[in-house]
Amino acid sequence: MKVFVTGGAGYIGSHTLIALLAAGHEVCVFDNYSNGSPVALARVRQLSNCDMEVVEGDICDEEALARAVADFAPDAVIHFAGLKAVGESNDIPLRYYRTNVTGSMNLLGAMDAAGCGRIVFSSSATVYGEAQYLPFDEVHPVAPTNPYGRTKAMAEQVIRDWTLTTPGASAVLLRYFNPVGAHESGRIGEDPQGIPNNLMPFVAQVAVGRRERLSIFGDDYDTRDGTGERDYIHVVDLAAAHLAALEFSGGVEGCEAINVGTGTSITVRELVDAYARACGRPIPFDIVPRRPGDVASSYAATDKAERLLGWKPKFDLDAMCLSSWRWQSDNPDGFPLAK
Ligand code: WQD
């Protein structure tokens, strides 16, 4: 199948490319490298021993995007490109709406013009907001509490309405919980710009000596050990979920939201302890006040993913930490700048 992948040079996109190429799909990547690396794409080619088309471009550039989609004439699209930092979205909401919502509308318009009616969309558990019950299932109310989450919920709604007016269209909205880890080779992985917002990349940078100490945001939550608990999912399991969603989208019409998590929760302290085991050294940390906007607990109901996609996660927390550590220790400063 010919698959057009926006944001394929990013963390989850690059891991999904490996799975797509291994499955024999023909791929075209569309990326502006704002949060991805051309070096990651070069390494994907090496790891897959396959080539792929790459178009450097921004999903906010409607004409360039439409031209790239028309030229490639895909059977399906996987849409990763977007901005994804909750804190940043509070500071620059308009940029988040322009990129995540208008960019998605540009893509759907390009797909219509090219006669492509299949999309897998990179959404997020952030759309749920505060838990009214746990685990989160796909019928939990969507009530995001920050501009980033609102752009994801809005893009989901745009895609849902698009399927209603596009004959034969199918869309799968994958609501990620907390993606972590790296490809077993250690050649690609998570390489956040600047100070990592997320827990595991920060812990990884402490372990490799790039950061002094981890700040644990609060230990007074109503959880096993007082620290926040989340549903961490190995990025390679997440990539496999995209392949399963792609296959599923070929046999159905309409729009399905599907959680992608493990269904189990891990606290911050438990993750730190697992990372210390993986890297063989203690992770120094301080307990500091809670981070505004954080919730105590978030984890997924996973039966819909298993029922519709036939997908189940394979990797446990130790595997997540070991793979992250292999990437970080082999690439202490992340991807080198492209020459
Ligand atoms: C996890 C836990 C923190 C950093 C966010 C987005 C979500 C998704 C994943 C895009 C929490 C604690 C963290 C640190 C800490 N991204 N923590 N010290 O907030 O669950 O989800 O990233 O889709 O949309 O909301 O992930 O990794 O930031 O935090 O103590 O330096 O680690 O309080 O309990 P989060 P996270």
Image: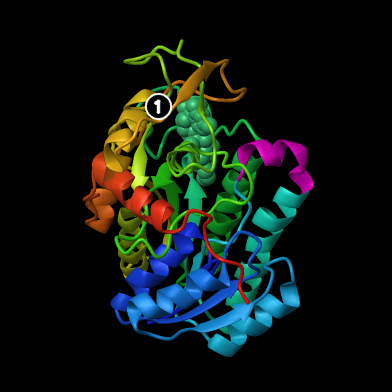
Which quadrant would residue 12 be assigned to in this image? bottom left
Dominant SS of magenta comes to helix
* Residue at horizontal 58 percent and vertical 15 percent from the top: 289
Residue most extreme to the bottom: 71
Left or right of residue 121: residue 136: left
Left or right of residue 157: residue 302: left
* Residue at horizontal 29 percent and vertical 60 percent from the top: 184
Q: Nearer the viewer, residue 218 or 119?
A: 218
Which quadrant would residue 259 be assigned to in this image? top left
Q: Is residue 92 magenta?
A: yes
Say which amino acid is labelled 1: Val
* Residue at horizontal 38 percent and vertical 32 percent from the top: 136
Which residues are the magenta region? 85-94
- From this view, report whether residue 77 is shown above or below residue 53: above
- The image shows residue 182 at horizontal and vertical percentages of 37, 55
Q: Secondary structure at mark 1?
A: helix
- From this view, report whether residue 130 is shown above or below residue 54: above
Image color mode: rainbow
Residue that label 1 marks: 268
Q: Nearer the viewer, residue 146 or 277?
A: 277
- The image shows residue 288 at horizontal and vertical percentages of 55, 17
- The image shows residue 249 at horizontal and vertical percentages of 37, 66
- The image shows residue 232 at horizontal and vertical percentages of 36, 40
Q: Dot 1: within a 10 Å radius of its alpha carbon, few (fewer than 14), some, or many (20 or more) residues?
A: many
- Asked if disc 1 is less than 8 Å from ligand 1, the answer is yes
Q: Nearer the viewer, residue 95 or 273?
A: 273
- From this view, report whether residue 177 is shown above or below residue 265: below
* Residue at horizontal 61 percent and vertical 43 percent from the top: 85
